[in-house]
Image: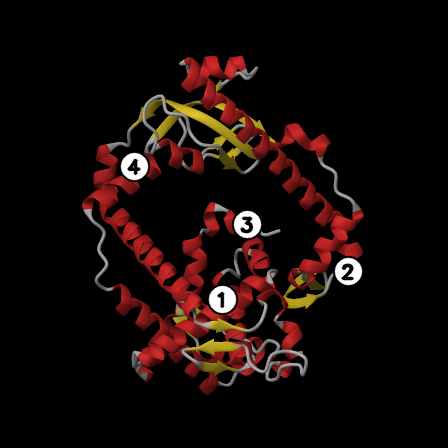
Amino acid sequence: MLKILRHKNVSRVVLWGILLLILPAFILWGTGAGGKSKQSGPAFVGLIDNKKISFSDFAESLTAIRCQIILNYFNQPRVLNTLLGSKAFLGKLAWDRLLMAEKAHKANIKVSNKEIVAFIKSHPIFSRNGSFDDRLYSYILRNSLGLELRAFEEIVRSNLEIQGFNNKMTQDIKASDKEILEAYGRDNNKFKISYLAFPASKYVDRAKIDDGQVRDYFEEHKNEFTSSVKTDGKDKTGAETAPTFDDMKDKIKSFLAEAQVKYIAIKYANDQYGKLRELMAKDGLSFAKAAARLGLKPEESAFLSRNEYIEGLGEADKVVDEGSKLKPGEVSKVIETGNGAVIFIVSDTQKFDKEKFNKEIDDYSKKVLEMKKSYYLENWLKGLERANTINIDFKDYEKYYR
């Protein structure tokens, strides 16, 4: 149900940025029941460096993460609703934030009152006509965030400590000229391909989803479903209800059918891929002749870049990424696309404009460096997750402390 999380505009780096580029924005959410676990559940959320993490700590972190997302994406409602709609996603971010906060504390990262004030005053949500507005600041804290000034500002301190720790960890990371050039090529080189398309739309009549499958999916994921409460026809941000099975039945059935036909398309593509490679290897056939032997006819594309689309299949980014790795005449692996699968060879390459690259190199170097830091921190965080203990299921965390 979270297709948008795989969209290029909400990449893993953007999602990681929810944790790194922390905004001073928090609301009290679920705190009325956030301090205790049910008697039947675990006594604490987990262990971080052998220290027990209480349900109060987790609820506070969850509140922080949820509001960060609201303020980061308040002007992108589709992204906002998708991110807030996954309790498992929110729960994992809340746990990751606790992991990082503990490391920042142990590293003795300090943030001054002056830094906190400067950060708050620079936040656009508290500005009116381009300048910080103290009355607006107080109003938002009181009426939208439900926090006292002191409590809010101490939360900001904690966030800036995490950011400071992350900056310290990545301060020695550099991006080489070769890395910058290769990354720019991946983003800007174009490829013509000769391809075999396996669009999921061809297999729609094979989708067979019964009510039992729909019910099972609903029961497994119902904690991830939320509905906006509307007032006077407008969405009231943050208000949620729990949809019933009848509310979600048609959407779930459509989602499962879409996933099923895509699976069928990918499976068929893999079957044909094995036969294609065998014909090319044993009989020395070209890609086109081997495809014809299988009753398939390759299509020819125009020049494709990462930001373009393949008719009937969706975004070309994975195809272009794979194409950049292939030798002339080499057959790609089966590439899953937004609407199916594709197998191809590169028939022509159009290199990026060097003059354009020279004009953009400074900005692009910064982009590559930030990407490299993000990957480093992502792997570091995965290591933290493995080294510590979690006692709850993120998608069902509410049942432990209601």
The amino acid marked with disc number 4 is Gly
| Alpha carbon distance from label 2 to label 3 | 23 Å
Q: Which residue is mark 2?
A: 244
Q: How would you rate the neighbour count of disc 4 (Cα within 10 Å): few for under 14, some for 14-19, many for 20 or more? A: some
**Image location of residue 293, percent across then percent down:** 53, 13
Left or right of 351: which side holds 228?
right
The one of 210 and 119 positioned closer to us in this rendering: 210
Sequence-first disc among 3 and 4: 3
| Alpha carbon distance from label 2 to label 1 | 26 Å
Sequence-first disc among 4 and 2: 4
Sequence-first disc among 2 and 3: 3
**Image location of residue 147, percent across then percent down:** 53, 82
| Alpha carbon distance from label 1 to label 4 | 33 Å
Q: Which residue is mark 1?
A: 93
Q: Is residue 42 visible?
A: yes
**Image location of residue 272, percent across then percent down:** 54, 25
| Alpha carbon distance from label 4 to label 2 | 49 Å
**Image location of residue 399, percent across then percent down:** 66, 73
Tags 1 and 4 touching, CB below 8 Å: no
Q: Is residue 129 visible?
A: no
| Alpha carbon distance from label 3 to label 4 | 26 Å
The amino acid marked with disc number 3 is Ile
Tags 2 and 3 touching, CB below 8 Å: no
Left or right of 248: which side holds 396?
left
Tags 3 and 4 touching, CB below 8 Å: no
Coloured how? Answer: secondary structure
Q: How would you rate the neighbour count of disc 2 (Cα within 10 Å): few for under 14, some for 14-19, many for 20 or more? A: few
Q: Which residue is mark 4?
A: 185
- The residue furthest front is 282
The amino acid marked with disc number 2 is Thr
Q: Residue at x 73, y 54 (%)?
A: 216
| Alpha carbon distance from label 1 to label 3 | 17 Å
